[in-house]
Amino acid sequence: MNWKKSCLEKPAAGRPKRIRPAGTKCMRGRPNPPLMAPISLPRPRLALVNSNFSANQGGSIFDDKRGQFSLTIFTFHHHVYAYDLQTTIDKLDILFSHVPDQWDTIGSLIGEISQGIINNESKWRQIKTWNDLLTQKPLVEGGIPQKVGNVAASSVGRFLRILRRAVKTRQSGLFVDQLASRHKTIANVLGKIQGGHTYVVDIAKLTDAEQTLVFGDLLRTVYELYSEGGASSGWEDEAELPEKVIIFVDELNKYAPARGEGQNSPIAEQVLDIAERGRSFGLILFSAQQFMSAVHPRVTGNAATKVMGRTDSAELAESGYRFLDKDIKMHLTRLDKGSLIMSHPIYRQPVKIKFPRPAFKQGR
């Protein structure tokens, strides 16, 4: 066969023939460009840690400049997270962040329990599980709450009711009396955090108390890891830690509200530590919420970059938007879908940015 006069590419050894597609011209005398190169399957390079007890695989196909295609496989590793009493004893304050405690009675009792179990004091040595804490001395005797230190029995009873509801009657399976071999903790996984990896913690199926505990545990673990130079997790060399860690949080106003008793809770204090001092350690916080005014002012005040979509005039009247002039505020109330206003110190005025329409929606 005369390959120069045909519309077939002469196959090389071990290569398939490429046929000219219908309706296109044949360039005789020149080799036809390859229509599709073999799909390459590189090694997995993105690890996602998911706490909703599911595992998946996904991928993305992209077209490079030569018209060739390659397929990148992303492997989603999943772990089953759980909390027993021994690994949660230093996080009880986070678990009770949503509980009003005007006189700090709950906080004082949590301090008594934590110090007693961590220091292995004699009256706390038999407390090993959640059930032991809820039913045995020194908190309970004969089914009746007992006074502990300076905390009255009535306050101990309130603590027990809230704790029983969180770890027994209304839990989703996150709390166990003893960790199994398949169970992981946030400290186990993030204590060995690696650069170039993405860790996704899905808390959608957890109760409110469990969501608060997991989020606070995550922030505290990462903050202590960097503030102590990795010593808390056994890193031998601080240089092994990733240079930067970016934390994305949805609906941050739930954990660091601008008003109410929640703004002084342990979880809010943890968020403020990240917002105010995290950048010096390489920790960067990204948050998304419906109303910026609902977030603690010390968090928004430390945010160098603010991005705003279409916003109601009532929200723009809040004090957190005083850095915008009247014309920009008026423009914010009429922004189109996909248009945003970004404020950053390097720009003298806020900048309008626009997301392009997806390729599959062009012309529609």
Image (spheres, grey):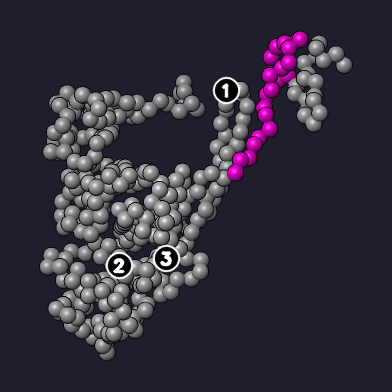
Report the residue at 41% width, 75% height from top. 177
Q: Is residue 180 left or right of residue 65?
A: left
Spot the residue most to the bottom.
Answer: 142
Frontmost of labels 1 and 2 is 2
Report the residue at 21% width, 78% height from top. 157
Using the image as rendered, state which of residue 98 and residue 223 is in the foreground.
223
Dot placed on the residue nearer the N-terminal end, 1 or 3? 1
Residue 219 seen in the figure:
no
Q: Mark 1 belongs to which amino acid?
A: Lys
Residue carrying label 2: 90
Residue carrying label 3: 82
Q: Main secondary structure of the magenta part?
A: loop
Dot placed on the residue nearer the N-terminal end, 1 or 2? 1
Distance from disc 1 to disc 2, alpha carbons, whole Å, reads: 54 Å
Rate crowding at label 1 as few (under 14), some (14 to 19) or many (20 or more) other CA atoms within 10 Å.
few
Residue 220's spot in the image, x, y percent?
31, 57
**Bounds of the magenta segment:** 20-43
Frontmost of labels 3 and 2 is 2
Distance from disc 3 to disc 2, alpha carbons, whole Å, reads: 15 Å
Q: Mark 3 belongs to which amino acid?
A: Ala
Q: Secondary structure at mark 1?
A: loop
Contact (CB < 8 A) between labels 1 and 2?
no
Residue 63's spot in the image, x, y percent?
57, 28
Residue carrying label 1: 65
Report the residue at 55% width, 48% height from top. 75
Dot placed on the residue nearer the N-terminal end, 3 or 2? 3
Q: Mark 2 belongs to which amino acid?
A: Asp
Quadrant of the frame with the N terminus: top right
Q: Secondary structure at mark 2?
A: helix
Report the residue at 55% width, 37% height from top. 60
How many numbered marks are there? 3
Using the image as rendered, state which of residue 8 and residue 172 is in the foreground.
8
